[in-house]
Image (cartoon, coloured by chain):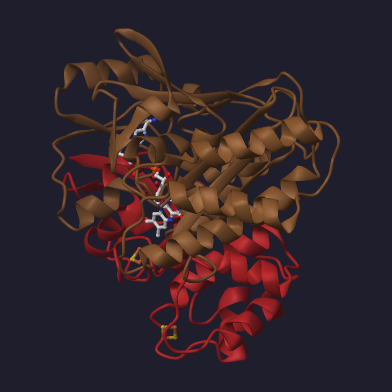
Amino acid sequence: MRIRLRVNGTERSVEAQDHESLLTVLRDDLRLAGSKNACEQGECGSCSVLMDGELVCACLVLAGAAADREVRTVESLGTMERMHPVQQAFVDAGAVQCGFCTPGFVISTVALLRANPEPSDAEIKEALAGNICRCTGYGKILEAVHRAAGQRV
Amino acid sequence: MPVQVVRHLDEALDALAAMPRAEPIAGGTDLMVEINFGRRRVSDVVAIDRVDELKELRTGREFRVGAGGDTRIRVGGGVTYTQLLTDGAGSVALWEASRTVGSPQIRNAGTIGGNLATSSPAGDTLPVFAALDATVVLRSREGERRVKFGEFMTGPKRNVRRRDELVLAAEWDDAGPAQTFIKVGTRNAMVIAVASLAFVIDAARRRVGIALGSCGPTIIRAADAERFAQGWLEERGWDRPRRPTEAERGELGRLVAAAARPIDDVRGTAAYRRHVLAVIAARAFDRLAVMT
Ligand SMILES: Cc1cc2nc3c(=O)[nH]c(=O)nc-3n(C[C@H](O)[C@H](O)[C@H](O)COP(=O)(O)OP(=O)(O)OC[C@H]3O[C@@H](n4cnc5c(N)ncnc54)[C@H](O)[C@@H]3O)c2cc1C
Ligand code: FES
Ligand code: FES
């Protein structure tokens, strides 16, 4: 089944399997491996993307149902030379260890700060409840979000 | 399997009627897990998440604590938890239940219609609909059927919805401010309920609704506990706020726990579920009794 969608500002057309998720389309067909695949059941948040501006798990979006949607992945945020403020804050705070969860946390943080530029600890914890990190113990991630708060995201 | 993206209700109902094996998908938060794990093979899918007619939200007035009266509330089947939390749920208990669902990602995608259609005994909105005595509005090309929640869900993941029908909406009479939903889980976020309870005191209609989730094969109405609370309110006077005594709270809790039909599973034992139900029911009674 051929589907058209807009990914990181570019019109794309892919041939997707019927049962395929948006996540596998992004990773396998469009070679955008920033969104990670860890659980495929909505539990870990490592596949988080913005679809029409809303934070969702790409593993829970049926590819065919994403037709004509606007999808933003972590690849659209910054480059190695010019990192996005949220990416920079994660680096500066040392909030990255193995890094597997990081793209998901970065996207969720962008969604949070767009809605609430100066969140409290409690608000950050609630907004990031759908993202799991096995390494950092979350302390540095909390610090990274505070560092990024108040900047244009 | 073609995935058909539809934009209007008629289009969705036509597609379901035309394709005998078609299944709707809304937020995908239940169905995609099944598909990803190969537990369910779907042949034809109708994506209904862009159907505006399913996103209707009628809360009568701007939802606020303290609102009451004879307003009829209607929540479309395609309304997401995020939409309810932002625009008002028409029920404090439904708002509280929506707030406990999953994570922001899940609440942005997951819908009321999906929760109803899945009919998991752990579905968080379901005890609320039971306690509110809500009506589930089903629509197919043949027409509309209105079914009380108590007759809608018939067992674990079973309900009376025909496959060509959509959950168009849930409807109920505004029950006023004295209502709550309490969920107990193994941690604070992203949990399937170990036990949950919805408690509604509708002072205007002289009615009490108490329903339990994750405590049996289906959602359970605690009828004896409802009668006890109703009798207590008759005696006290429906509009004369007074706290129940410890003995009265204990009795209410005991009756709620007795109504449950829990099992032992990985999330908790039957004994723990009964214990926790007695505690949260007594707490809810105490809190709501002074609000009427
Ligand atoms: C990580 C995670 C956490 C979760 N946490 C919770 C939680 O805390 N509490 C809770 O209750 N649930 C939870 N869920 C389950 C799920 O999010 C909810 O049941 C949600 O309401 C499902 O809605 P949906 O739109 O995503 O359904 P979908 O997955 O799109 O559909 C589910 C089923 O309903 C049918 N369907 C959907 N919409 C309609 C309609 N309008 N008419 C007829 N049939 C329809 C579909 O055909 C399918 O069979 C969780 C799920 C995940 C993945
Ligand atoms: S891979 Fe999507 S939430 Fe884990
Ligand atoms: S840094 Fe390793 S999982 Fe988060």
Q: Which chain is brown?
A: B
Question: Which of these two is toward me, A86 or B225?
Answer: B225
Look at 16% across and 40% down and name the residue there.
B42
Spot the residue most to the right.
B240
Give x and y (percent) for residue A78: 52, 72
Give x and y (percent) for residue B146: 42, 16
Q: Quadrant of ligand 3?
A: bottom left
Look at 37% across and 63% down and name the residue there.
B270
Whether residue B232 is visible here, answered yes or no, is yes
Whether residue B209 is visible here, answered yes or no, is no
Please say if B193 is above or below A91.
above
Question: Which of these two is toward me, B245 or A82?
Answer: B245
Question: Which of these two is toward me, B109 or B149?
Answer: B149
- Total labels: the figure holds 0
- Residue B94 picture quarter: top right
Give x and y (percent) for residue B5: 32, 31
Please say if B115 is above or below B102.
above
The quarter of the picture where the C terminus of chain B appears is top right
Look at 19% across and 29% down and name the residue there.
B22
Give x and y (percent) for residue B127: 49, 42
Q: Which chain is red?
A: A
The quarter of the picture where the N terminus of chain B appears is top left
In the image: residue B160, left or right of residue A115 = left
In the image: residue B100, left or right of residue A120 = left
Please say if B189 is above or below A62.
below
